[in-house]
Amino acid sequence: MAYDPGAIDATLAAAVGDEPQLIAELRQAFVEGVQRGLSGLETAPDGDHWRIAAARLKGLAASFGAVRLMALASEAIEGVPHDPLLLRKLRRVVARL
């Protein structure tokens, strides 16, 4: 599954129209929220908190059309908490936002 950087901007443009400044602000808010979500995964004290953080990240990704991030968050929900390979994948996706 490839990362499509235009999907987030297209989703935002569909929601708010041709308002570049507003799109930029919403994109920044999205990125900050995703970073907090990733931090929540990294610091989750147990499996329950891990799954809750992953579900929140998945919901945020779905709201903005970030398909790759949504898929990885789904893997996190179903997978082993603190899986180092999955966390590396998530960090890469987040870094490209």
Image (spheres, rainbow, N blue to C red):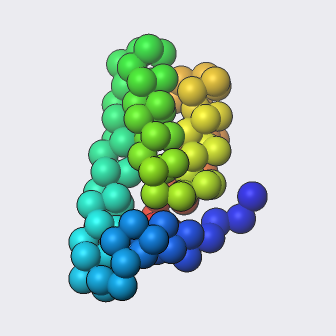
Q: Quadrant of residue 72?
A: top right
User: What residue do we see at 30% from left, 83% from top?
Assistant: 19
Q: In the picture provided, is 7 more to the left or to the right than 49?
A: right
Q: Residue 53, how many percent across, how many down? A: 40, 30
Whole-percent x, y for residue 29 in the image: 27, 61
* Rendered position, 48 above or below 44: above
Where in the figure is residue 63, as x and y percent of width and height? 45, 51
Asked whether residue 24 appears in the rendered view, the answer is no
User: Where's residue 24, x and y in %?
Assistant: 30, 77
Relative to 62, is 13 above or below? below
Residue displayed at 48% across by 67% down:
11
Q: Nearer the viewer, residue 56 or 11?
A: 11
Name the outermost residue toward the right: 1
Q: Is residue 25 visible?
A: yes
Q: Is residue 31 above or below residue 53?
A: below
The image quadrant that residue 49 belongs to is top left
Q: Is residue 97 left or right of residue 24?
A: right
